[in-house]
Image (cartoon, grey):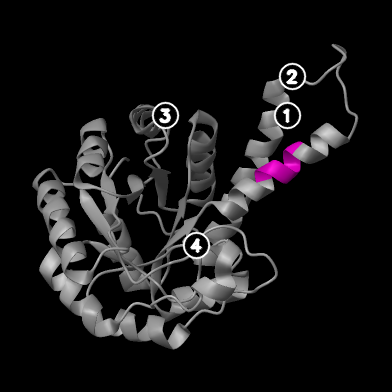
Amino acid sequence: MLMSMAPMLQDAREKRYAVVAPGVNDLQTIEAVFQAADEMNAPIILDCVEMNDIEAVADITEFMALRYPQVDVALNLDHGKSFEVCAKAIQAGFTSVMIDCSMLPFEENVAITAEVTKMAHAVGVSVEAELGRVGSAQKYAEDRLSPFTDPVEAVEFVKRTSVDCLAVAVGTAHGLYKDEQPELAFDLIAELRTVVPVPLVLHGASGTGDDEMARAVQAGITKINLFSDLSLAGTRAVEEVLNSGMTTPLGFLPLSMVYGKGVAAYKKMVMHYIEVSGSKGAAVR
């Protein structure tokens, strides 16, 4: 069932597990996520960035929701940068949107986020926002010093914006790390979980490590955004096929076969993180 993130994440917050939010961009990755959630009996969130064809992603998701009606799924715009793109996603059929104004001064972040929330809530769409700065894994040595989410500001931000969940900066970064291992501020996560009345979101979770991710969930993280680890697993699977010298009676491998290996690896990694997040068997059916 296609639904808002809000009730899904509230259940996860109360029961101390996290909902996995894989980044998707086409029919194959979207169906792979539906299949993974179905097989693991887990709620799931599809994250789609605005640079993708969001209308096509919305249409495909609606189709898959009919094919897999037993799956609890939300479709979320990831890192929407403006009121206009959030409105476009809502019109396309997204059930949740993220407005990311974390690079702006606090008051501007509050003002824009509050307007998006007002619009979204009017039509039953949930809203995610970000406070603090989740930097780049490629520049982790520098970006790890970026501002973490301040608990006092977070409480005020949620109160003034009425967002349904909050992405927090607690030591992770977007993308693939070079040599560094991210250092998560578990005490800060626990403090934020205590004082902030809405679910907390971990961006840049790829490369965190299973033990650290599970610990972050127990500390208070309720939504886990993943893309790099999933994409890397798929890419490596495709490379293995191409480097294997395998052929068919045709003398070559059909593109669908090659890409299928990548999608299968992507799906397997999604299922792995459902296990790590504690959301296996958590779907309400």
Q: Cα distance, mark 1 to mark 3?
A: 25 Å
The first of marks 4 and 1 along the sequence is 4
**Where in the figure is residue 32, as x and y percent of width and height?**
54, 38
Q: Nearer the viewer, mark 2 or mark 3?
A: 2
Name the residue type under label 4.
Answer: Gly
**Where in the figure is residue 131, as x and y percent of width and height?**
30, 69
Toward the viewer: 208 or 217?
A: 208
Residue 194 falls within the magenta-colored stretch = no
**Where in the figure is residue 226, as x and y percent of width and height?**
51, 55
Q: Cα distance, mark 2 to mark 3?
A: 26 Å
Is disc 2 surrounded by few (<14), some (14 to 19) or many (20+) residues within 10 Å? few
Q: Which residues are magenta?
A: 234-238
Q: Which type of secondary structure does the marked residue at label 3 adopt?
A: helix
Residue 168: image quadrant is: bottom left
Q: Which type of secondary structure does the marked residue at label 2 adopt?
A: loop
In the picture of the structure, the residue carrying the numbered disc 2 is 254
Is disc 1 surrounded by few (<14), some (14 to 19) or many (20+) residues within 10 Å? some
Is disc 3 surrounded by few (<14), some (14 to 19) or many (20+) residues within 10 Å? few
Is disc 4 surrounded by few (<14), some (14 to 19) or many (20+) residues within 10 Å? many
In the picture of the structure, the residue carrying the numbered disc 3 is 67
What residue appears at the point 81 percent right and 35 percent down from the top-left corner? 241
Q: Which type of secondary structure does the marked residue at label 1 adopt?
A: helix
Most extreme residue toward the top is 250
Name the residue type under label 3.
Answer: Arg
In the picture of the structure, the residue carrying the numbered disc 1 is 258
Residue 237 falls within the magenta-colored stretch = yes
